[in-house]
Structures are given as structure tokens and as C-alpha cells.
Amino acid sequence: MVDLKENIQFIKGVGPARVKLLNKLNIFTLEDIITYFPRDYEDRGIYKKINELNVGDIACFKAVAISKPTVARIKKNMTITKVIVRDETGSALLTWFNQDYVKNQIYGAEEYTFYGKVQKKIGDRVEISAPIFDKEGENKNTGKIIPLYPLTNGMTQNVIRGIIENALKLCDNSFEDFLPDWILKEYDICNLSFAINNIHFPEESKDFLKARKRVAFQELLILQLGLLNLKERGKIEDIGISFDKNENIEEFLNTLPFKLTNAQMRAWNEIKKDMESNKAMNRLVQGDVGSGKTIVACMAMYKAVKNGYQASMMAPTAILATQHYENISKLLEPFGIKCALFTSALTKKQKEQLLQQLKNGEIDIAIGTHALIEENIEFKNVGLVITDEQHRFGVRQRSKLSSKGEKVDTLVMTATPIPRTLALILYGDLDISIIDELPPGRQKIDTYAVKKNMENRINDFIRKEIKSGRQAYIVCPLVEESDLSDLKSVEAMFEHYKNVFPDLKVEFLHGKMKNKEKDEIMSTFKDGKIDILISTTVIEVGVDVPNATLMIVENAERFGLAQLHQLRGRVGRGKYKSYCILKYDSNSDIVKQRMNIMQETNDGFVISEEDLKLRGPGDFFGTMQHGVPEFKVANLFTDMDILKEAQECSKKLLANDPLLKMPENAGIKAKIADLFSEKLEL
Ligand code: ADP
Ligand code: MG
């Protein structure tokens, strides 16, 4: 059996120059090259007769050359090689520019297989430029499905294909399958040798699909098992802080003007249990916008501080961090808990003072932006770290905050509702609490999807709301005028609305402004001194202005549903009836369906499921920005069915063999170790 860790230089056809090129592609070992999968395939396996070929067809046909090709010079730097070939149904004129060598590769009266795109057809004669061809019986480049690999400068498809062919020959199907037999049977998975051979060189597309399924399945299975294993191991190994049981949370709850919802209570109890146990907490709290995650976070911080520890909470924007600071300090300072705000807006002197107080323990709770993970931030004894709007941060930032203390408890919060299956693979290392209930008395936000021609009526409506004392947001998709000039930019939109409402106070806000400017505008809006705030999605996260009752979204078709739902959550935060108006400019059915979903439901989970179904691959995750694992073959989006099978399979495996100690699972265990030591920084 060959050693898959063998250097690629032992493969036939790989000399020092090619070793260098392959290294550039991150290919070092035999294993690397046989798992260097095609990025695409070209099906050169469709045969036609010449008279069946039509202009635009791309196909193979067998034909005999009437005579040797001729070469003619047509311009100073250009030659043309021509040959006429025929089969029993017609003839074809084949031409190549500047490829004189073709004349020595085609002989009269011999048969070849040609593959190319038909340019012209006159009667039974077709014309094809630069077809690819093979001698009869050779079929190197034609007559089959051809893999296309990602390349680097100096490497060609033919060369890498040849190398992979040789590598596979060297391996001679001696792959040891690391998946136990029962898995192959139960999930209808082909064996590893078949998969590897057919993902490179499938005879037929059904073989390719089988091979692809196997590879996607194993990628998803290994990642899922690894994440679950990590979680279990964390529970055993990571001895964390055991917070005391007897802080008096009632004392805190009694000062709130409301009662917790059942869902908040449930999440709290899960957090409390984690905090009191001696394992380090790693918990995600998922809850729709407005479901009241902040209070729950506050309770956890209260508990941590009452136990003599510090706590910290990180938010993605200065606006949001400031808002958290204001709310939380109001709630906790009556209990002698000192909060401080860390953003980049601090002066050097202020910052130095705060750093000092944080280090000596005068500050109990540090709230802030990324500023909290800077090198010079030191705590006296932080015991709990919280990340708000987790989807805006990467795994690395999350763990950086946690590394400010020893074995701290970690809580992450997100308002992006993610279907359970996906959450398991995106946040597989976290325990999940879901707050699936809004506080009572919340009014439904009426949502209307309208087309451009309703503009005047909408403007009248905006004016009416503002005259009765309310405020409005208008959100548009882009920051600057760009090639997509049909999309109005924030500034152009600002000019537009200033003209429409000359008597109202209109302002704008976008991500490219300085933080200080943004904060100023936001707080002026909060104080009610701006009627209409035009903005990009920077206001998407967490900001609370109860007097704002109107959310208008321009070009709503350009947003993901989950994102629209977040935007909608900016209104309806006070006692007034609120509205969301989605202006869209499209006749597509999909757009209409998506707008309908927004009109019909306020449930973030339903919306995200639908969003997943309706949007193209990648878009859904595009709005989540971070933390999506990379696969060679699997696609979380299109392979949802395979993901579900892999998840079911990982549960079964672990139920039988929780620590993967059985010999039949040794191969799987090794794969997990491979993946996690190199790729996942957790
Ligand atoms: P999110 O989950 O979007 O972060 P917040 O924590 O900002 O939501 O809460 C939204 C609003 O609801 C806040 O004004 C908060 O004070 C209020 N709130 C939270 N929990 C309750 C509750 N149980 N009953 C009534 N209002 C609540
Ligand atoms: Mg929030």
C-alpha cells in the first residue's frame, strides 16, 4: 500500500519545476494531490453525427480527415490551418489560427474524435474553430467528462490532469476506507476508492454524483463530529469558575418595570446552571430582535459581579455599545456595580484612567466595541464575557475576548435566527438557548411591500406620521453612487428627500462616516431632533429609538430577508403603532414571494427558513459575514439533505462510541484530529 504522505516528487511526470508549481497550490503530498478536487467539469461525452450539429452546439463527433491539413499565412502574424473531415452524414470545415503543428497531428484518411463549438452551418457542412481532438481509440481529451482544476500561472489543465492520473495509478485503489461499513450501507455512500477516482474522472454523471455525495458527506460528518466532540470534551476538561448559587437575583428583577417572559426565564436558567457548574460556559443565546436578550445578559453580569468577578460585554458598533452602557449602568449602578464604556472615542487620558481602574478592579463591568480586545486591556479577574450580535464577529475575536481571563464563562448573543440544522454546524461547539417569545403587549409591525409608483402615497404617509410627532428611518442599500447607479446612494437619497420634505429635519448616516459623526447623528435622532434619518444598514443592529415608528426600505429586493427582518426590528420599540414599508423595483416572482413572506410573518425563524429556500447559494451566508466553515466540496446551502444525514449519522456514532475509542472509528478520529489541528482555531 502506498503512503499517502509521500512527497509529490515521486509521482511520474513531476520534476522540480512542477513540484514548485504544485506547492504554490498548497499541494505537497500524494494525499494533497488526490484530494485536489476539480472546480468544474466539462462534459465532452456527448456524441453527435455531423448533420445533427447546429450552430452553437458544443459536442463530440467522429470523422475522417479527407486529406492532410493545409496551412496558409493570412496576415503577417497569422496563419490558418484548415482541414475538411466527414462522417457518413456530412462534412465539417475545421480551422485553427496560429497552430501550425496541427498539420502534423492529423493524417488523411484516418479517423479522429473532435470536440468543439459549431460556428456556422451551410447545408450539411458545419464550420468549427479550434476543435480539440484525439486519435481514434485514444480519448485523452474527448469523449468523456473532463475535470477542470483551479490553476496557477504556468500550470495547465492538461498537465495537472496528467499528474492526477499518474497519482491515482500510483495509489492503485488501495485507499483504506475510514468510514465503517454500516455508514456506507445506511446512508447509501460509495466507498472511498470509487469516490476518489470518480470525483476526478467520472465515466458518467451518475458516478460523479455518487462520488460527490460521498466526499460532501464525509466533510460534513467530520466537521460535525469534531464540533460535537469539542463540546463534550469541553464539558469534561475545561474546569471553569463555579459561581455561587446565592446571589439574590430577585433583588435585581424587582427593580425592573416588567416581568421576564417564560422564554427569557428559560434562557436565564440555562445560563445560571452553566455558570454554577464547574465547566466553562460556552453558550449562544438566539432571540429575535426585541426579544429581550440584553436583560438576560445583564442578569448574568449581575451574578458574576456579585460573586466577586468582573464581566465584559462587546458589541459591534459604537452606537450599540454606548446604548448598552447607558441601559446597563442605569440598571446595575443602584447595586453598587460600576460600569465603564470602552470605545475608540476615548481620549488618551480617559483611556489610561479606565485601563488602570479595570486592572485594579474598580470597574466591575467593561462594555465596549473591538476596543475591548486590544492588547493593553487587562482585567483584574474577569469571569464572564459576552459578545452581542455574534454574527458580526469572527470566531477569533470571540475567543480573543475570552482569553482576557482564565477559563471564563462565555455567552454570545445573536438576533440572526438560524435554522437548527445550520446552527449545529456553525455553532456546533456552543450550547444554544433560544428566546422564542416577545414580551407581551408588543404591537405587530404592519408591513407593506409596494412598488415605485406608490411613492407619493408613501410620502404622504411619512408626513402624516411625523406631523403626529413620530420619526422615520429610510434605509437604502449602498454607500456611494457606483456602477449600479440605479440604486440610490444615501447622499442622493438625502437630496431627494430634502426636496420632498423641505419643512422637515432630514439627516443621513452611513458606514463611511467617522464614528464620532455617526454617534452624534444617532443621539440627535434619539433625542427627537431629527424627523427622518436616511441611512445604510449601519442602523441594522440593536439601536433603540422608541419614538421611531416608520421603517422605509428602498430597493428592498436587494436585501436578504433576515436582514429586512432585523431592519424592521428597529421600529415598534415603543408604545406607538409602527410600520415597515418595503419599496421594491422588480417584476420577478421570487422577489414577490419574498416580499409576501415579509408581509405575512413576524417570526424570524420562519423568515430565515424561507430565506434559505428562496435565495441562491452564498447569499444567505453573505449577510452573516463570518464564521462559516470552508469545505472542498460540500456546500451548506445546496447540500442541506446531506448535512441532515451527516448530523443524524454523527449522533448515532457518538451514541455508540462517545469518545470514538472503538477500532472501527479510529480512521474517523484521525481525520477529525487532522481537520482541527490545522484549520479550526477554537
Ligand atoms: P434584543 O433581544 O433585540 O437585544 P432588547 O434586550 O434590546 O432586545 O429588548 C428590547 C426592549 O424590550 C427593551 O426596551 C427592553 O427593556 C424591553 N424588554 C425586555 N424584556 C422585557 C419583558 N420581559 N417585558 C417587557 N419589556 C421587555
Ligand atoms: Mg440586542
Image (cartoon, rainbow, N blue to C red):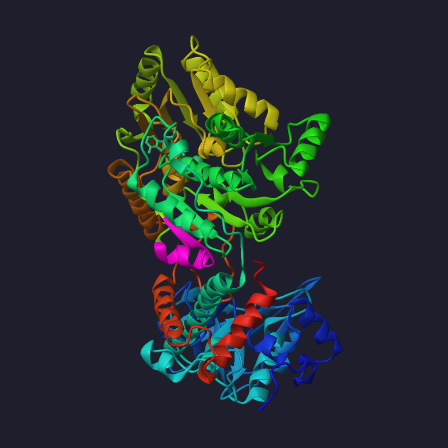
Q: Position of residue 134 (x, y in %)?
A: 53, 82
Q: Looking at the picture, how far across and down is residue 230, in whole percent?
A: 50, 64
Q: Quadrant of ligand 1?
A: top left
Left or right side of 258 for 55: right
Outermost residue toward the bottom in this view: 1
Q: Picture quarter containing residue 74?
A: bottom right
Q: In the orientation shown, which residue stands out farthest toward the front?
A: 246
Identify the residue at horizontal 34%, vertical 14% (top origin).
463
In terms of depth relative to the viewer, which is nearer, 82 or 614?
614
Q: Is residue 73 above or below residue 246?
A: below
Q: Name the outermost residue toward the left.
A: 600
The residue furthest right is 16
Q: Position of residue 588 (x, y in %)?
A: 31, 43
On the question of residue 94 being in view, the answer is: no
Determine if the magenta segment contains residue 264. no
Residue at the spot 46% in from the left edge and 16% down from the top edge: 527
Q: Residue at x 26, y 39 (%)?
A: 601
Specify the segment rendered in magenta: 420-433
Quadrant for the N terminus in the image:
bottom right
Residue 549 sits above or below residue 311 on the image: above
> Which part of the image, by quadrant, shows the C terminus?
bottom right
> In the shown orientation, is residue 394 left or right of residue 126?
right
